[in-house]
Image (cartoon, grey):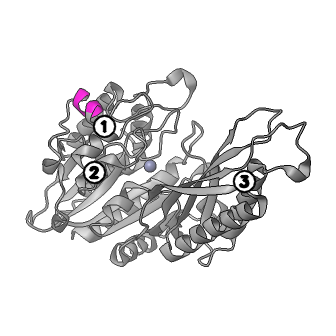
């Protein structure tokens, strides 16, 4: 089975084929069946598959020196709703393909190589990367009871229903000293490589989100009876703030900060009432923490300035604040060397999206390899990367694993 055929087959494990795209959320029966199928592919490629107590799937290719810290590679095979077939899947099936190729070429690794399919990278429970967070000890048993999906099903309940054990968190812990490095192959999910006509992205850092909620409160007066000069319109203040967020992110010290207001809630939301209250949910990301912090501070200051001028009250509440990580220079250099050896064009770049590698990268050396995404699309049925681009990514991953495991 070619990699392309494997990706097409995995795409048939789908809870909502009629809607287009792929829906395969973590801890569902469809996800379980898909994971079993991936484990069979691991076994076919000569690896020993094993599922840890929280649902992370590992496939091991034992090295000649089993005591040496191993090389980990992988991504995820869960999807968001009506998503594409490559996001995450490439990093798992591509890693199995890379191992099969290295084995066929007669390579004998000194370090063991393990392919991993992390449980739940997509945020079914609000928080993403739950499998990798559990593996590095960043979720507690209480978190598993607290975090729930849109139907109120907690992580603990979903895990138990899928035959996993929410009380076995300790047994799912990965000892960082047993890992030499983790390498994750992934589609870019942006249009930088396509725009520049380059084949491979070598990720140097992974940006992380700082998300928060700003609430502006004015006066919900009658839209007809209230003269313009007597209004305290929260939405007009919010509009000014949204454009200021765009300006501040664009003018960030690093030049790489991005800022988005993806949610705007207007109350009371009636055509004949001046908006009295508006909530803005703001997402600011960068791989440069100081620049991100600078932009966030400037946004909060701007909110107070605009609110003061317009007679509005302002509150700021935290949502999430993840720490960006730098990829390990040695892994970056190794991947660049693999690109050079293969004669592939490459670009050093930051990852604007977060991945399991960001979570794991707080505890051990990581690197990431990107292949182009057509039109920069992902989390969408039209997500696409051509077979030759997928093959190039797998070849670079194989070259990177060969060097790291030697
Ligand atoms: Zn992904």
Q: Does the residue labelled 2 lie within 8 Å of ligand 1?
A: no
Q: Relative to residue 48, is residue 136 depicted above or below?
A: below
Label 2 with label 3: CB-CB less than 8 Å: no
130 and 321: which one is in front?
321
Q: Which residue is disc 2 drawn over?
A: 139
Q: Which residue is disc 3 drawn over?
A: 238
Instruction: Give the magenta part as a residue range.
Output: 157-161
Image point 48% across, 60% down: which residue?
370
Residue 301 percent location from the top left of the image = 64, 69
Residue 167 percent location from the top left of the image = 16, 40
Outermost residue toward the top?
18
Q: Which of marks 2 and 3 is nearer the N terminus?
A: 2
Q: Is the magenta stretch mostly helix, strand or loop?
A: helix
State the SS at label 1: helix
Side of 106 relative to 24 (left or right): left
Q: Badge 2: few (under 14), some or many (20 or more) residues near its Cα, within 10 Å?
A: some
Q: In which quarter of the image is the N terminus?
A: top left
Q: Relative to residue 198, is residue 9 depicted above or below?
A: above
* Badge number at residue 155: 1
Callout in the foreground (1, 3): 3
Q: In which quarter of the image is the C terminus?
A: bottom left
Q: Earlier in the sequence, mark 2 or mark 1?
A: 2
């Amino acid at each position: 089975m070619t990699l392309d055929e494997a990706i097409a087959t995995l795409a048939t494990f789908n809870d909502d084929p009629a809607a287009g795209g792929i829906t395969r959320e973590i801890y569902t029966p469809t996800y379980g069946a898909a994971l079993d199928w991936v484990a069979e592919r691991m076994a076919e490629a000569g690896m020993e598959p094993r599922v840890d107590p929280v649902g992370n799937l590992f496939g091991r290719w034992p090295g000649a020196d089993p005591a040496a810290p191993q090389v980990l590679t992988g991504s995820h095979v869960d999807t968001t709703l009506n998503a594409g077939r490559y996001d995450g899947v490439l990093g798992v099936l591509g890693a199995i393909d890379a191992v099969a190729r290295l084995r066929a070429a007669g390579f004998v690794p000194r370090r063991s190589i393990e392919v991993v399919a992390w449980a739940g990278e997509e945020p079914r429970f609000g928080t993403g990367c739950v499998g990798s967070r559990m593996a590095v000890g960043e979720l507690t048993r209480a978190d598993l009871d607290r975090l729930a999906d849109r139907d109120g099903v907690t992580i603990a309940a979903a895990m138990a229903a899928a035959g996993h054990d929410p009380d076995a968190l300790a047994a799912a812990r990965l000892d960082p000293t047993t890992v030499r490095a983790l390498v994750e192959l992934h589609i870019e999910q942006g249009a930088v490589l396509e725009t520049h006509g380059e084949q491979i992205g070598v990720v140097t850092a992974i940006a992380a989100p700082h998300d928060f909620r700003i609430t502006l409160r004015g006066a919900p007066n009658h839209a007809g009876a209230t003269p313009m000069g007597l209004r305290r319109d929260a939405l007009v203040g919010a509009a000014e703030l949204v454009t200021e967020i765009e300006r501040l992110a664009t003018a960030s010290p690093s030049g790489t900060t991005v800022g988005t207001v993806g949610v705007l809630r207007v109350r009371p939301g009636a055509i004949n009432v001046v908006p009295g209250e508006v909530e803005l949910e703001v997402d600011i990301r960068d791989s440069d923490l100081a620049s991100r912090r600078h932009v966030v501070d400037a946004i909060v200051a701007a909110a107070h300035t605009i609110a003061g001028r317009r007679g509005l009250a302002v509150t700021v509440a935290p949502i999430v604040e993840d720490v960006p990580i730098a990829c390990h220079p040695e892994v970056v250099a190794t991947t660049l060397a693999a690109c050079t050896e293969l004669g592939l064009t490459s670009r050093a770049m930051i990852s604007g999206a977060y991945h399991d590698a960001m979570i794991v990268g707080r505890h051990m050396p990581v690197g990431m390899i990107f292949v182009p995404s057509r039109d920069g699309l992902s989390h969408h049925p039209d997500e696409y990367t051509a077979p030759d681009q997928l093959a190039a990514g797998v070849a670079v991953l194989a070259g990177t694993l060969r060097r790291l495991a030697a």
